Image (spheres, rainbow, N blue to C red):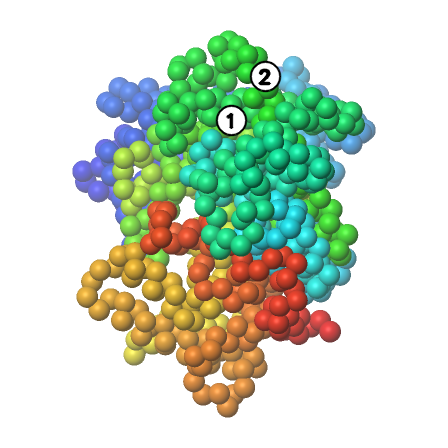
Amino acid sequence: MSRPVNGDAALLALAQAAGLDTQWTDVFGKRHQVRDEILRKMLVALELPCGCSAQISESRSWLEQEARQAVARMVIAQADEAPVFAHTGSTAYRLALDGGGQCSGSAEHAGNGLLRIAPVSRPGYHGLSIGDSELVLAVSPPRCPSVETLAGHPGRHWGVAAQVYSLRGQPAGHYSLLARLAEHAGRQGAAAVAISPVHAMFSAAPQRFSPYSPSSRLFLNAAYIDPAHVLGNDAFLQALDQGEREDGYRMDEDALRIDWPRVLPQRLRLLRRMHDNFRRRGGKSLLEDLEKFSREGGEALESHARFEALHDRHVLDFGAESGWQDWPEDFRDPSSPGLRAYAAAHENEVHFHVFLQWLAHKGMQDVQRGARVAGMPIGLITDLAIGTDPRGSHAWSRQKEILAGVSVGAPPDLYQALGQDWGLTAMSPRALRDTGYAAFIEILRAAFRYAGGVRVDHILGLARMWLVAQGESPADGAYLRYPLDDMLRLLALEAWRHQAVVVGENLGTVPEGFNERLREKSMLGMSVLWFQRDGQAGEGGEPAPFSLPSQWPSWTMAMPTTHDLPTIAGWWRGRDLHWRERLGEAPEHGQWSKAAHWREGEKKALWNAMQAAGCLPVAAANPTAEVPRDAVLGFVASTPSPLVMVSMEDLLGMEDQPNLPGHTGTGVAAHPNWMQTLPMSVEQIFTDRGVVSGIAAIRRARGEA
């Protein structure tokens, strides 16, 4: 690897030993050197002092010593492959197999202080005793469950994708509406319903409502609770009568945008009254069920509830954008005596947040149950966000596992020329290994708990994360490497334990060989229509042609678009270009007229591809003003993908996409990120003429009757 003359060789060596890539390649193939100043900030975040030569030398020695003395808490292997791990001393071992049974043997020396034991064919978390050490042997299956395996046949399946908050109708809670959507879609032949993240947000800060910036990935969003689902309609009406009439959920049935700062506090006031009533005179069986849920949730649930209570207490002092870092020092440590005393003194408030998680849990359980009853072989595909807000519950309760002073983002690319800083935390690779991947496994289990599949947001982060130092431009970041083999194997193991599919969001700058690794593990990648092109733009400046359906990958989930990209109708009518011009994204004179002209060329290219694929009549020479929505759906659905996913926005012909990245403002002029609702109720959707026509086009292309 080349290095500029003015680079600090010792600093670069330390950075590379710590897992930082000191160079990176952009989407145009150009190599960039990470500035020394940036590397120093990254190393400080990794707890490796590097302010002078002596510190660099000391940190390098510390890393080497750490590697020599590392005692694995977990050994990770693949089924039928011999596990190899570092160990000195006795070679006699005993295995307590997950699910029952034992075996024993003598390990072989594998050189360099490593031992090798006999292959284990049974996937699971096995207890490995060797010498004085007690380890966990995690044995992963070679592959994740496939769509075909879960369906019981190799058919060409399809599903719908929904932003949970966008659902409208009765019952009023979004979890119940999601269950109804799944039931209706299942009856239409859908195999799955994919959703936006339902991670826990900040109850006391309704202004922070992006589902990809959660407070915790271990728990659920309380804003989506149906207040009548568990406790009954009478309890709901009683609580409604005890307060202001506008506190009810039903006020928002006809809103096309959700005013979160108004709606969430109203919902929480109602739920507080329901909680108080329930504690005084709730039914015995439900009270016992809540207590059982609380016990099973253990320390993690208690910590989250305490965080929510404390955050509510301190928001008034420090503002809606504050976090645990702003609290009095005694409350920044989840295990401090002062915090325990506060929780005891405010037991009812802490219990309220446990109560909310219980209601959300019951709602999500019924979503997957209803989907399977309706005939879906997969059912719910949940979305695992790439990280959490550093000010939130998860970062507070797992401080030793996260990196401070840096955030997750993305380098500059074709669509975000300045790069991206998502403001999210990143887990420490060293802490993951030192703790036996406990935090990672905890997150995976929460994601799979209610689902037949999980979409891993930015799955490239299992190999490397683009980190941005605090106060720096997203373009001045660096990649930090992660233990990809271990993390993919644990992901496959949890998918196998839950009998669920894995979808990896692998869009963007993909490291060489990464997609092949996903395919080997039977993890679905993602193929999005707007990116499926056959070669480059033409010499005359015309857009690159679209790939025919037969040329699409056969191992990915195919879809017309994503929540961050234009809908079919929005793309065809240039709605996304309108928004970007309106928001001042490119002020250069004539920029947007050129973009509009380019879009017309793209429409012609897609039109030609749909004609070649038999999705449009050949006689129609030019694109029409009317959006050829059914033809586009049929085009994508005729790909060899085992699973095609279509958004509710596309089924309903909506123009505005759920999220326009880089624009997080509010107000009349702002893009309605994460607040746009569907134009009709869940009960009306599948009787709508356009939806019926669109589903028919999908089913024909998928080979269904």
Residue furthest to the right in view is 101
x, y percent for residue 329? 40, 14
In the depicted structure, whether residue 50 falls above or below residue 207: above
Secondary structure state at the residue bearing disc 1: helix
Disc 2 + disc 1, Cβ < 8 Å: no
Q: CA distance from mark 2 to mark 1?
A: 12 Å
In the rendered image, the quadrant that contains the N terminus is top left
List x then y, in percent, for residue 422: 39, 42
Observer able to see residue 337: yes
Query: Which numbered disc flags the more N-terminal residue, 2 or 1?
Result: 1
- Residue appearing at x 51%, y 23% in the figure: 309
Q: On the picture, is 75 further left or further right than 508?
A: right
Horizontal relation, residue 391 to residue 520: left or right: left
Examine the rendering and report whether any part of residue 525 can be seen: no
257 or 608, which is in the foreground? Answer: 257
Q: Residue at x 75, y 61 (%)?
A: 153
Q: What residue is drawn where x is 43% and y is 71%? A: 572
Tell me, for residue 347, which label it has, or none.
2
| Disc 2 element | helix
* Disc 1: CA contacts within 10 A as few (<14), some (14-19) or many (>=20): many
Q: Which residue is mark 1?
A: 308
Q: Amino acid at mark 2?
A: Glu
Is 495 drawn above or below residue 605 in the view shown?
A: above
> At 42% across and 31% down in the image, what residue appears?
390
Q: Position of residue 417 (x, y in %)?
A: 30, 54
Disc 2: CA contacts within 10 A as few (<14), some (14-19) or many (>=20): few
The mark found on residue 526 in the picture is: none
| Nearer to the camera, 364 or 376 | 364
Q: Amino acid at mark 1?
A: Glu
Quarter of the picture holding the C terminus: bottom right
